[in-house]
Image: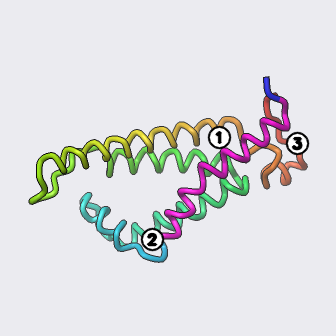
């Protein structure tokens, strides 16, 4: 059984690891939304550029909230829902790039399936974080006067 200090350090490390991708991805979308807008448009959504900016801002803000441990449970649940949604919408189907060899499209489809599983796995991590909370090394703990309970 781990002690409380170790659990809090693991929660901090988990928050950093879970949020890093979203902070980097969100920043990239905000400074250059074209690639994401293309994917969004390809999925049939209107206002693709606006949605790319919104997705980028969401990822950046929610990722920063998780990494510093601010409103962690809410941010984690929202990021879990976001990763499931994006997995289902953008990573659940077969890839068929015109003029690509069948073997290349099959490989892309396999990678797309791996991306779907990655999204579901990340969602699971965020749900665990939502259940556990941010731990002692967080703004949530400071706001609560350092009395955030973590199972030992």
Q: Position of residue 61 (x, y in %)?
A: 60, 63
Say which residue label 3 marks. 147
92 drawn magenta: no
Task: Name the residue rendered at 59%, 49% in the picture.
Answer: 18
Determine whether, in the image, residue 21 is placed left or right of residue 13: left
Task: Name the residue rendered at 18%, 49% in the picture.
Answer: 105
Q: Secondary structure at mark 3?
A: loop
Point out the image quarter for the N terminus: top right
Q: Which mark is residue 129?
A: 1
Determine whether, in the image, residue 79 is placed left or right of residue 147: left
Question: Quadrant of residue 3 in the image?
Answer: top right
Q: Secondary structure at mark 1?
A: helix
Say which residue label 2 marks. 53
Q: Position of residue 10 (x, y in %)?
A: 73, 40
Q: Position of residue 149 (x, y in %)?
A: 82, 36
| Relative to 126, residue 138 above or below | below
User: Which residue extends farthest left?
Assistant: 99
Mark nearer the N terminus (3 vs 1): 1
C-alpha distance separating marks 2 and 3: 37 Å
Magenta-colored span: 3-28
Mark nearer the N terminus (2 vs 3): 2
Q: For the residue carrying disc 1, how many other residues have a C-alpha within 10 Å: few (<14), some (14-19), or many (20+)? A: many
C-alpha distance separating marks 3 and 1: 17 Å
Q: Position of residue 136 (x, y in %)?
A: 82, 45
Determine whether, in the image, residue 90 is placed left or right of residue 13: left
């Amino acid at each position: 059984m781990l002690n409380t200090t170790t659990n809090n350090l693991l929660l901090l490390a988990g928050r950093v690891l879970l949020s890093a991708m979203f902070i980097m991805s969100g920043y990239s979308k905000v400074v250059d939304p074209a690639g994401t807008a293309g994917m969004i448009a390809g999925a049939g959504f209107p206002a693709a550029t606006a949605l790319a900016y919104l997705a980028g801002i969401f990822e950046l803000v929610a990722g920063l909230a998780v990494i510093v441990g601010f409103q962690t449970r809410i941010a984690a649940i929202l990021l879990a829902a976001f990763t499931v949604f994006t997995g289902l919408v953008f990573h659940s189907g077969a890839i068929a790039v015109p003029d690509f060899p069948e073997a290349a499209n099959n490989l892309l489809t396999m990678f797309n399936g791996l991306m779907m599983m990655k999204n579901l796995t990340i969602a699971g991590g965020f749900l665990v974080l939502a259940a556990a909370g941010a731990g002692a090394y967080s703004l949530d703990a400071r706001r609560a006067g350092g009395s955030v309970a973590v199972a030992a």
